[in-house]
Image (cartoon, rainbow, N blue to C red):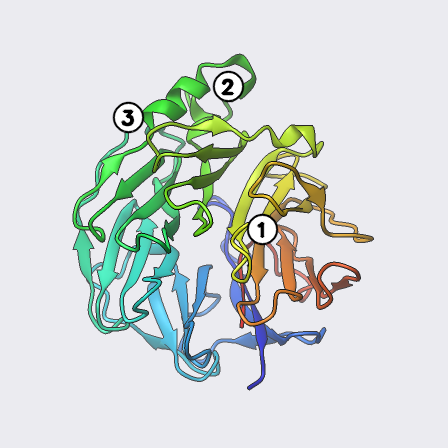
Amino acid sequence: MTQYVYAGAGRWTSASADDQPGGLMRAEVGSSEWQLLSQGLPPQAEVRSILIHPDDPQIVFAGTHDGPYRSSNQGESWEKLNFPDPSMVVWSMVFHPQNPQTIYVGTAPAAIYRSNDGGDSWKRLSIVETCGSVNMGFSMRVIRMAIDPSQPNHIYAGLEVGGVIRSTDGGNTWTDCTEDLLRLASMDHLKSQIGSDTDIEGMMDSHAITVSSAQPGTVFLATRMGLFRSPDQGDTWGDMEVGRFSPLTYARDVQVSPQDPNVLYAALSPAARSEDGSLYRSDNLGETWTRFDHDVDPESTMMTIALNPQDDQVVYCATRGGQVFGTQDGGTSWQETPLPEGLQDIYTLACG
């Protein structure tokens, strides 16, 4: 079966131009030809998340400004799912690691939903407000979720801008994991204030979260201020000090390799809107890092990473400005596959 890389774009903020292109694109792995996927999707769909079924790559989910959509033919056509709150913007999606019929969806305004039948029906779960919620002039969003593969009832959600919450019972109840992040936010070098009235803003600005089976209960978090690790299911947090290895520390994505639970990838840049970006790799769960994207020229913030679950040699990353970089030989060589001109504000990639 043909393997594809999918890219989703959308407006950066609600203040962006109404005619700024959004959309969902697809290219064969190794190809430079992008195809717009639009049949059944809303016009200029703002796509914030893409999820490929782990057992059947024909099935793909797209999280949009119009709720979740599903394709059964690798994106050729889409159906709108029967979502209880269709006005919600879907920012994140994750499969239960042992049962892909169970899917969790995170939205803006901040809410989490669960489906136990592959997306046919949904239930809204009751989540908690964190002690670090920050008013940034936009609705707080569940920007990323992760499930501990060794403890699949343990779910973590990163909130932009609000820290982290955790469930240990499959999403039925949630607790706040933000208190110790606030302790870190009191340190001078971790203070940041751009769009609110508080300098805890940077530490609460969660972008990605992940868990590795190599260290059950250890959670990795990407924020505006860098990369952070919790060894105890989010109760306490420590700075991974990625600045020892990279001059760029604004972290937009962090992911665990599907093939090797000791390998992490991180998308690092100077800021949310910048003229540089990078992809780093760690072979020891963040103890050390090396630059992974060689001989490429990112011209804007590195936003997102896509790892191929079938082939660890295939890695993609994308910048906010629409550059997509890919390797098929484990990082030895890279190919730039830019999206069509004008398509920017890339939020999500998926490969499979």
What is the three-letter code of the residue carrying label 3? Cys
Image location of residue 284, percent across then percent down: 59, 44
Q: Which disc, if any, is residue 131? A: 3
Identify whether 159 is placed above or below 41: above
**Pointer 1: residues within 10 angstroms few (<14), some, or many (20+)?**
some
Report the number of numbered marks: 3
Mark 1 → mark 2, Cα distance in angstroms: 29 Å
In the rendered structure, the answer to whether residue 195 lies left or right of residue 123 reads: right
What is the three-letter code of the residue carrying label 1? Val
Mark 1, residue position: 263
What is the three-letter code of the residue carrying label 2? Lys
Mark 2 → mark 3, Cα distance in angstroms: 17 Å
Image location of residue 225, percent across then percent down: 54, 29
Mark 3 → mark 1, Cα distance in angstroms: 32 Å
- The mark nearer the N terminus, 1 or 2, is 2
Residue occupying image coordinates x 79% and y 60%? 332
Image location of residue 18, percent across then percent down: 49, 54
Q: Name the quadrant containing residue 139.
A: top left
Image location of residue 6, percent across then percent down: 55, 69
Mark 2, residue position: 191
Q: Name the quadrant containing residue 173.
A: top left
- The mark nearer the N terminus, 3 or 1, is 3
